[in-house]
Every structure is written in structure tokens, then in C-alpha cells.
Amino acid sequence: SVTNKKPSQASITKVKQFEGSTSFVRRSQWMLEQLCQVNGIDSNRDSPEFDLLFENAFDQWVASTASEKSTFFQILHHTCQRYLTDKKPEFINCQSKIMGGNSILHSAADSVTSAVQKASQALNERGERLGRAEEKTEDMKNSAQQFAETAHKVRFLV
């Protein structure tokens, strides 16, 4: 999961979904601080396999797809950069886009920024329309008052 506040503890949990089952079973769990190395195995080939090296363990992983592996790496890299102050894990044999500019997190941030800009523009346009409606309402009120005054004068003249 992703949070804006520094978690008191961050962990990596390996789960497995058995064939024919909709639930997941927890297989292993490590603290984020224990992660020493993330090995994408081959940066030139899209494959779902990767290895994680922890202080006291080595574990082989398989994501559902190569795309999910890439997303996991991007989020893991971002989380490590954000929350680990002392020793950060080494990312090897990973595609360079995972570490920088075109990450899924930047894309998500760009999407949110775009949505906020569109909403802001829509609010500004609505504010302008409301302002024009308010002016027209004031003009109509003044016209109605003038009409009422004129009608009152005509009634007394007749």
C-alpha cells in the first residue's frame, strides 16, 4: 500500500494464490529495512521472475506478469527511496525506467495534476457563469423595482 505518512514499520509480504482458489496465502514476510538487493534477472527481457536478497535470506519470486513485476519494482523503489534513511537496497538487472522519469508513480501524479487543473478550470468557468447570472438577477431586480414604482405612480394618477 502507499501512504503519505512515514509508516512505523514497512514490510514485504510474499503471498501465493493456489490454482482454483480466489484467496491468497501468506508465504513469507520481511521488514523493508532487511532488503539488500532487488535483482530483475534480465533487464533486456520482459519476464515475471525476479529475486530479492534480504539480510538473512534469498528468495525467488514470480509476478503474475512482467508488467506487474515492473509496477512492483517501481513502487518498491519509490518506497525504499522515501522511507529508508540509512541503507537503501541495490536494484540490479532492472530496466532503467523503473528508477526514474517515466515511472508509474510519476504518471499517476501527472494524471492527478491534470484532473486537478481540469476541475479548477471547470470551477473557474462555473464561477464566471454564476457571476454573470448574479449580475442579470440584480438587473432584473432593479427593473422590477422600477416597474413597481412606475405602476404605483400610474395607479395614483388614474
Image (cartoon, rainbow, N blue to C red):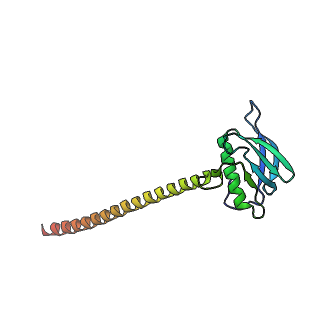
Examine the rendered structure and indicate whether residue 21 appears above or below residue 94. above
Q: Is residue 110 left or right of residue 93?
A: left
Q: In the image as oriented, which residue stretches furthest toward the right?
A: 56
Q: In the image as oriented, which residue stretches furthest toward the front?
A: 44
**x, y percentage for residue 59?**
81, 45
Q: Which residue is found at the position 70% from the left and 60% from the top?
A: 81
**x, y percentage for residue 84?**
75, 61
Examine the rendered structure and indicate whether residue 46 appears above or below residue 85. above
**In this orientation, which residue lies closer to the viewer: 24 or 145?**
24
Q: Which residue is found at the position 75% from the left and 55% from the top?
A: 90
Please state, as top left, top right, bottom left or bottom right, where the C terminus lies in the image.
bottom left
The answer to which quarter of the image holds residue 7 is bottom right
Q: Which residue is found at the position 25% from the left and 64% from the top?
A: 144
Q: Is residue 28 left or right of residue 73?
A: right
**x, y percentage for residue 79?**
70, 56
Examine the rendered structure and indicate whether residue 64 appears above or below residue 30. above
**In this orientation, which residue lies closer to the viewer: 20 or 97?**
97
The answer to which quarter of the image holds residue 141 is bottom left
Q: Which residue is found at the position 39% from the left and 59% from the top?
A: 125
**x, y percentage for residue 67?**
64, 42
Q: In the image as oriented, which residue stretches furthest toward the top?
A: 20
